Amino acid sequence: MLSATRRPGQPTLAWQEHNAGVASRTLIGKVGTVIIAIRGGERAGEVRVLVEGIAHYYLAYATEPVPAGKEVLVINNRGARQVDVEPWPTVPPGSIGPPDGIARGVEEGL
């Protein structure tokens, strides 16, 4: 006969569902690094994302190809360790502000 009780150390279903929701919310908005190039469309690559100090690896999809080594922003969690990403711009050392035409200050009257 099957036991209706859980084994010691085994998480409850409520705990598992709660953590799945928390993981999804904490993943979106994180910046990761492309490990295996993303080819674009439905052709996945692989990204490494640090979540609470621990490296996690996900299959990653983007609308455009993203080469290995580039940083990306997680914009959607598909579940089953799959995410949608978009390129995250890196600011070169020594640059002061965004490129021309991106964002202008109030002082300029725009």
Image: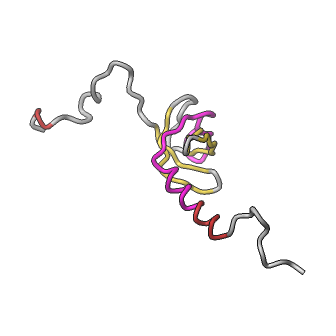
Residue at 11 percent of width and 33 percent of height:
108
Total label count? 0
Q: x, y (%) of residue 99?
A: 29, 28
Q: Is residue 25 magenta?
A: yes
- 48 or 6, which is in the foreground? 6
Q: Is residue 73 above or below residue 23?
A: above
Residue situated furthest top in the rendering: 94
- 23 or 9, which is in the foreground? 9
Left/right placement of residue 104 relative to residue 36 reads left
Residue at 38 percent of width and 20 percent of height:
93
- 55 or 41, which is in the foreground? 55
Q: Is residue 10 magenta?
A: no
| The quadrant where residue 57 appears | top right
Q: How is the image coloured?
A: secondary structure
Q: Is residue 2 above or below residue 27?
A: below
Left/right placement of residue 104 relative to residue 56 reads left
Q: x, y (%) of residue 22?
A: 54, 58
Q: Which corner quadrant holds the C terminus?
A: top left
Magenta residues span 20-47
- 3 or 87, which is in the foreground? 3
| The quadrant where residue 92 appears | top left
Residue at 56 percent of width and 45 percent of height:
61
Residue situated furthest front in the rendering: 8
Left/right placement of residue 2 relative to residue 108 reads right
Q: Which corner quadrant holds the N terminus?
A: bottom right
Q: x, y (%) of residue 90?
A: 42, 29
Residue situated furthest right in the rendering: 1
Q: x, y (%) of residue 21?
A: 55, 62
Residue at 9 percent of width and 37 percent of height:
109
Left/right placement of residue 70 relative to residue 82 reads left
